[in-house]
Image (tube, helix red, strand yellow):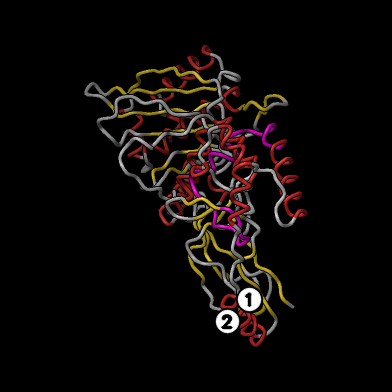
């Protein structure tokens, strides 16, 4: 029996995975649950596990390629002989197959009449139908969902012969209708990411048009396009998804010396102590634990604090669960484990998703006197903490979703937090 191994869906935001390495070679035995490959997602490097006992068979997907989720990357077969046979067949097929040339007449016809039938009418009809469907979907969907996952990581070119355009790192085919639509709307296909099938369709073009203008690089210095790492691509998508959130900022200058001294005495980091203080303050004012949804305000039953961490190549937000009620030392141990996973790039989705309140502390950079943070999707507020000034005062800036939190709510929150930072018995 031959069973396909597919690129797994490892998080809600994952659209592609970058294959980092194969832990097994073709023909080697594998056990159910054994890690046969490693995949880099938008936040971490995770294992692809075998779902059955057997032998790994090819063709294996290439390393360092962005592969759409659910696409086959390998096979598991019952015997070593079958695995070797599959590998031989794959090499033979690769050596004998040659792509059919695209007639120039078709290209010329496409430039004047993009929707005209091609040599295979059924295929053309299906393509137009797909684009029409994609157009309807794009018209009712959020623009950033397609486009801004877009310029980040182009997918590998599809194997079917088609007209293609060249980016700095790969060739991505596009349908005739998508090309015509892009031409009419003034969209440069070079900066669009293709759909799951490796082709740019009308949905991607319409999403790009709705998302706003792209930078015009034609008159600037020479440049080349670089693939973004999955983590940076995810941050770009997530931040752009917040553009339509109506936010406001409110600030206060508070003293941190007392909290810092007590945190050192308890042998916990200042960031952890701040996260605890925020969680206790959110628990006193449940509006900060709500989030806006089209159906109404969702009130969460516990306070989960996401803390921004710089990885050197991006930004992740490990989450401390139930940060207002659990013992401080238990939270400290969780935080130690989360930081270890972050350094190794091994955070799982449950480690960084679902925060109800966020904290971003840039106090370790002494020259940062003030900054505003962006409220992430899924929360209603984020607190930005700067470095202390020469008088021992620190700027705290609270960014809030105005659909949930009003100015007076934010003012009261900072007032309660200020009291908590001065009276630190809660750290004992």
Q: Which residue extends farthest top?
A: 408
Query: Does residue 346 appear to the left or right of 145 in the view shown?
Result: left
Give the residues in magenta: 137-163
Q: Would you call the spot at circle 2 few (<14 residues within 10 Å), some (14-19), or many (20 or more)? A: some
Give yes or no for contact between labels 1 and 2 (Cβ–Cβ under 8 Å).
Answer: no
Q: Which residue is mark 1?
A: 31
Q: Residue at x 34, y 45 (%)?
A: 223
- Camera-nearest label, 1 or 2: 2
Q: Would you call the spot at circle 1 few (<14 residues within 10 Å), some (14-19), or many (20 or more)? A: some
> Percent x, y for residue 174?
59, 49
Q: Which residue extends farthest bottom?
A: 81
Specify the label residue 28 is tagged with. Answer: 2
Name above or below for residue 386 compared with residue 153.
above
Q: Along the line of sight, which residue is nearer the eye, 401 or 264?
A: 401
> Percent x, y for residue 414?
45, 19
- Residue 51 in sight here: yes
Magenta highlight on residue 157: yes
Name above or below for residue 86 compared with residue 303.
below
Q: The N terminus lies in which quarter of the figure?
A: bottom right
**Residue 83, picture quadrant:** bottom right
Magenta highlight on residue 124: no
């Amino acid at each position: 029996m031959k069973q396909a191994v597919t690129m797994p869906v490892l998080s809600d935001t994952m659209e592609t995975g970058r294959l980092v390495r194969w832990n097994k070679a073709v023909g080697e035995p594998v056990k159910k649950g054994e890690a046969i490959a490693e995949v880099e997602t938008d936040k971490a490097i995770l294992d692809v596990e075998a779902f059955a006992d057997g032998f790994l068979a090819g063709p294996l997907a290439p390393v360092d390629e962005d592969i759409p989720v659910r696409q086959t990357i390998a096979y598991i077969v019952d015997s070593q002989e079958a695995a070797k046979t599959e590998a031989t067949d794959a090499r033979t097929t690769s050596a004998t197959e040659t792509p059919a040339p695209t007639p120039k007449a078709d290209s010329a016809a496409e430039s004047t009449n993009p929707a005209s039938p091609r040599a295979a009418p059924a295929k053309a009809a299906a393509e137009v139908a797909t684009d029409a469907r994609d157009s309807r979907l794009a018209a009712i969907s959020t623009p950033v969902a397609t486009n801004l996952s877009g310029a980040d990581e182009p997918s590998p070119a599809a194997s079917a012969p088609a007209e293609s355009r060249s980016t700095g790192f790969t060739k991505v085919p596009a349908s005739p209708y998508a090309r015509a639509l892009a031409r009419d709307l003034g969209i440069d296909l070079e900066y669009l990411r293709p759909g799951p099938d490796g082709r740019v369709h009308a949905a991607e073009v319409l999403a790009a048009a709705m998302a706003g203008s792209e930078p015009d690089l034609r008159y600037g210095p020479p440049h080349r396009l670089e693939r973004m790492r999955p983590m940076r691509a995810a941050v770009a998508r997530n931040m752009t998804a917040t553009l339509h959130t109506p936010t406001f900022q409110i600030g206060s200058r508070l003293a941190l010396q007392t909290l810092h001294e007590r945190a050192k005495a308890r042998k916990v980091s200042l960031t952890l102590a701040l996260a605890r203080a925020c969680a206790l303050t959110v628990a006193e004012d449940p509006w900060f634990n709500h989030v806006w949804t089209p159906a109404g305000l969702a009130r969460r039953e516990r306070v989960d604090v996401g803390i921004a961490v710089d990885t050197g190549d991006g930004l992740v937000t490990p989450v401390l669960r139930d940060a207002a009620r659990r013992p401080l030392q238990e939270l400290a141990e969780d935080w130690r484990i989360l930081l270890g996973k972050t350094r190794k790039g091994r955070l799982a989705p449950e480690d960084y998703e679902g925060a109800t309140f966020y904290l971003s502390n840039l106090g370790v950079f002494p020259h940062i006197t003030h900054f505003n943070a962006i409220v992430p999707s899924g929360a209603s507020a984020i607190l930005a903490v700067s470095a202390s000034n020469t008088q021992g005062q620190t700027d705290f800036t609270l960014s809030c979703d105005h659909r949930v939190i009003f100015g007076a709510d934010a003012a009261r929150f900072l007032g309660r937090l200020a009291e908590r930072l001065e009276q630190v018995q809660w750290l004992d």
